[in-house]
Image: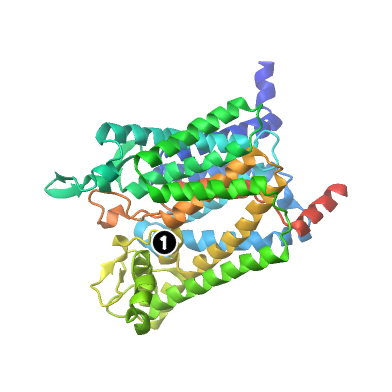
């Protein structure tokens, strides 16, 4: 009884209980347990309760002097603007029917970041614990998907049986265009790109194998086994894109491991980085202008037309067109257009681009998380998200360099890269392979997915201030 009382006291609860609950939630989230609708609603509420409790009993940097708090505004303001306007907007209120649900989405997402932020200095909540909780959850999810595919289809079927067709309710379906996926504890047929997402993130975790010390045999074994499950799924699906994205994440971590990158980059790397960012933003600006105004010189040039009006850019053009036409194909008022550009369109809006017939936006997928945010929330959260990505890149870089070859920290960065690459190049808002072209099958990247909760918690946990912020923190400790 004395032992129970000792464990249940406030200090023990904060030291061991909260980290255990967070790890359990991360495992369940990564497994996809209750990853839509009311299931995610429970996670949002739980993360809010945890964040509120940690905020009350925490003595962390958020409660430091004004100077330190001000330095952090450069990160938290873009985060707040992005989450607020990406969660509470006309698209969600119109489609999910309640302002309260959108408010809970915002609170849940922001709370997940705060939970990671408050626990980043915990003696119990080690990086490797967080890494393995996510890795094991993903491994269980991918294992179920892999076994279901092996039981339903021949090995390498997307390559060997891509043209095979079967009929369901009189509708033909290609075998190569579908894959099993455990969704809300039910096996569901989704597009192959959707199924390989968790496997690609899991495979990216293999990057930490280059960081473990030889005496960490148990950690190496678990890391290798779980990552191997991800690679087996990718190879069985012959998914070149997933394999390349996973290898890219691993390559980045390997380079940081062996090149001994310094925290303060020299002039040449800095100029090269901002040059690439500038060119990328310029290209993005041209893509948006073309979608808004349908430039004739682009459509009349075979080369430019192939670059800006084909493939995934065709969907992006339709998204931008919907924003600049107020979500209406019959004309909209100037006020509606301005609101659409800034804050997104309604759920029942239409888009027209290139003289085509009107298309409901819920039958449109941009194949990119960033442009789904642009469609649903407009340019306000879109710009805030770009700023947040740039700040997060710097924070993760500092976290990795200051980690002194810590395998758990390297694993978390690898997972962030894997999630980011998958969400940027492989996200599909119409994931279901059967009866997918219906309004009810639209899959929102924030409202219907567990990935943002996992990603934001890792970003909060790995948040690493710059040199100026670090000096302020050190001065406060000395004082």
Q: Is residue 361 above or below residue 449?
A: below
Q: Residue 363 placed where, x, y %?
A: 29, 61
Tag 1's secondary structure? Answer: helix
* Residue that badge 1 annotates: 372
Q: Residue furthest top?
A: 1
Q: Would you identify the image quadrant in which residue 118 lies?
A: top right
Q: Residue furthest right?
A: 479
Residue 298 seen from this side: yes
Q: Residue 408 versus residue 298: which sits nearer the camera?
A: 298
Which residue is at a point 14% across and 50% down the rendered structure image? 171
Which residue is at a point 27% across and 31% down the rendered structure image? 151
Tag count = 1
Residue 114 seen from this side: no
Q: Residue 262 placed where, x, y %?
A: 72, 53
Which residue is at a point 63% across and 52% down the rendered structure image? 396
Q: Residues within 10 Å of mark 1 (few under 14, many from 20)?
A: many
Q: Residue 227 placed where, x, y %?
A: 49, 36
Q: Residue 309 versus residue 198: which sits nearer the camera?
A: 309
Q: Is residue 146 above or below residue 256?
A: above
Q: Residue 17 versus residue 148: which sits nearer the camera?
A: 148
């Amino acid at each position: 009884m004395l032992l129970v009382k000792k464990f249940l006291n406030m200090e023990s609860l904060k030291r061991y209980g909260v980290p255990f609950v967070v790890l359990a939630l991360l495992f369940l989230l990564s497994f996809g347990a209750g990853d839509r609708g009311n299931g995610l609603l429970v996670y949002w509420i739980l993360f809010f309760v945890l964040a509120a409790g940690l905020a009350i009993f925490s003595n962390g940097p958020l409660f430091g002097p004004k100077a330190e708090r001000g330095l952090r505004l450069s990160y938290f303001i873009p985060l707040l603007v992005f989450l607020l306007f990406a969660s509470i907007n006309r698209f969600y209120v119109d489609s999910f029917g309640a302002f309260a649900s959108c408010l809970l989405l915002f609170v849940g997402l922001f709370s997940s970041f705060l939970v990671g932020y408050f626990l980043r200095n915990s003696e119990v909540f080690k990086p490797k614990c967080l890494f393995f909780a996510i890795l094991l959850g993903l491994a269980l999810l991918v294992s179920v998907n892999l076994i279901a595919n092996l039981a339903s289809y021949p090995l390498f079927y997307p390559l060997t049986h891509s043209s095979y067709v079967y009929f369901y309710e009189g509708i033909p379906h290609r075998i190569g265009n579908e894959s099993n996926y455990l969704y809300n504890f039910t096996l569901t047929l989704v597009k192959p790109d959707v199924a390989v997402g968790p496997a690609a993130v899991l495979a990216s975790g293999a990057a930490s194998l280059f960081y473990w010390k030889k005496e960490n045999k148990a950690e190496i074994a678990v890391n290798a086994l779980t990552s191997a499950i991800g690679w087996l799924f990718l190879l069985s699906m012959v998914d070149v894109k997933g394999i390349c994205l996973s290898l890219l994440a691993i390559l980045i971590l390997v380079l940081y491991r062996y090149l001994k990158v310094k925290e303060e980059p020299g002039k040449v790397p800095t100029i090269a980085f901002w040059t690439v960012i500038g060119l990328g933003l310029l290209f993005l600006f041209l893509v948006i202008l073309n979608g808004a105004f349908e430039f004739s010189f682009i459509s009349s040039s075979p080369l430019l037309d192939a670059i800006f009006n084909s493939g995934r850019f065709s969907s992006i053009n339709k998204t931008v067109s919907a924003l600049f036409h107020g979500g209406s194909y019959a004309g909209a008022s100037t006020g509606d257009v301005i609101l659409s550009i800034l804050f997104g369109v309604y759920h029942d809006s239409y888009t027209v681009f290139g003289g085509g017939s009107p298309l409901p936006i819920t039958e449109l997928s941009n194949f990119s998380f960033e442009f789904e945010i642009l469609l649903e929330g407009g340019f306000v959260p879109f710009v805030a998200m770009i700023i947040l990505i740039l700040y997060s890149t710097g924070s993760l870089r500092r976290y990795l360099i200051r980690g002194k070859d810590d395998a758990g920290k390297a694993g978390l960065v690898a997972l962030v890269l894997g999630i980011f690459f998958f969400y940027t190049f492989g996200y599909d808002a119409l994931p279901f392979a059967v009866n997918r072209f219906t309004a009810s099958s639209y899959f929102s990247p924030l409202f219907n997915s567990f990935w943002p909760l996992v990603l934001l918690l890792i970003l909060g946990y790995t948040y690493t201030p710059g040199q100026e912020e670090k000096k302020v923190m050190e001065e406060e400790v000395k004082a």
